[in-house]
Image (tube, rainbow, N blue to C red):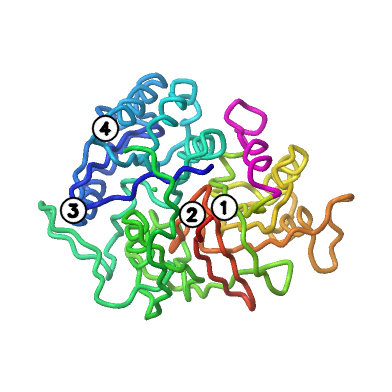
Amino acid sequence: MMKYPEFLKKGDLIGICAPSAGIGRKLESFDRSLGILRAEGYRIKETASVRLDSDRGGSAQTRGDELNTLFVDPEVKMVMAASGGDFLDEMLPYADFEQMKRNPKWLMGASDPTGLLFPYTTICDVATLYGCNAGSYDLPDSAGMQCTPGSDGCQLQDDQPAPGNSRTGQDDRQPQAIRTEHQTGLADESRYLRDNLRFLKGENPVQETSEKHLGCAPFLAERIQFDTPTVWKSNTGAIHTTGRCIGGCIDVLKDLIGTPYDGASLFVDRYGEKDGIIWYFDNFALSAEMLYRTFLQMKYAGWFRFTKAVLLGRTLFEKSESGMTYDEAVEWAFGGVGQKEMPGSPQIPVIWEADIGHTIPHMTMINGAILRLDYEGGRGTMVYQEN
């Protein structure tokens, strides 16, 4: 049975480690981000390697050991990855997944930390959060944030109703222990972060298609201003379904296929027939051709058995070697209007250009939870449900 760790309360301690890269190149931004978490009432514990100015937060063993110390510490109620990167896979042999299973805690990260979240949920049966790293709460010159430099007085302003757009002790509570709210209001550039913070507390906001999104990479923007209309594409007219939510950064997931950290078949065998599966993928920079081939590889490996729907976020850095478009990559892999899907495979409903992943705003995904997905006319809503 899927385990849901305890949600956070004011005064709880969040442990931060660097299983991927250190954050030494963006210390001021990182400290402002931690100020947001402190303003929510949380205490922070960093492991020794978090502030390294390096593409690796220490040696592979050091990164594993520091992660393990946070799961052993009974005072730490949640573990966050400091940042993304490229080399998390190196530390996986040093992560003590049996210990993590015995001491279930929320583990949250985005991008490269997929390499930890995915096996923790699919193999250990513990729910995880995908959406933010510990350094993700600082937005450049965002109108939705107020921060007093040199203090912990940073907070996300919440003077409007938040719409849904918007990671001790074993506890089998479901995400819906919690009130579900479908709120509406004018979008602003920090609302998706406020929703993420609400999930940490055990609230359950309905997440819905954004009106507009940032048209470039967040780290290339001088000011966060959503300027590009958002339309979710699909190979079908409407989707109304539920299923177990699982996924992550596809650039990372493709490297786990067939390894000891590939728990996809275990997860699908455990939940697929009973609940169905809803996959989500965050594409950082796979070309259209590589994305298509990765989807085929996942199909051949049995990942898409019992799949009710697939969600694919906006690609941050688009490219193609042959002229293939991302629309073609998705439709050739899963089937689409006027397009024959892979022989012997039924069409799988798929949405792409969704508010998931490296582009902002992006939704918070709960790996292992039951997800209700409704889509029609280029827009969709998502809400997590009780088992």
Magenta stretch bounds: 254-273
Identify residue for label 2.
Answer: 365
Position of 119 with respect to 44 (left or right) is right
Query: Is disc 3 placed on a helix, strand or loop?
Result: loop
Name the spot of residue 333 as percent of width and height, x first.
Answer: 76, 53
The numbered mark, 4 or 3, whose residue comes first in the sequence reads: 3
The Cα–Cα distance between marks 1 and 3, rounded to whole angstroms, is: 29 Å
The numbered mark, 4 or 1, whose residue comes first in the sequence reads: 4
Task: Spot the residue most to the left.
Answer: 150
The numbered mark, 2 or 1, whose residue comes first in the sequence reads: 1
The reply to whether the C-beta atoms of the residues labelled 3 and 2 are less than 8 Å apart is no
Identified by mark 1, the residue type is Cys
Identify residue for label 3.
Answer: 41
Position of 177 with respect to 143 (left or right) is right
Identified by mark 4, the residue type is Pro
Position of 324 with respect to 37 (left or right) is right
The numbered mark, 3 or 2, whose residue comes first in the sequence reads: 3
Identify residue for label 4.
Answer: 74
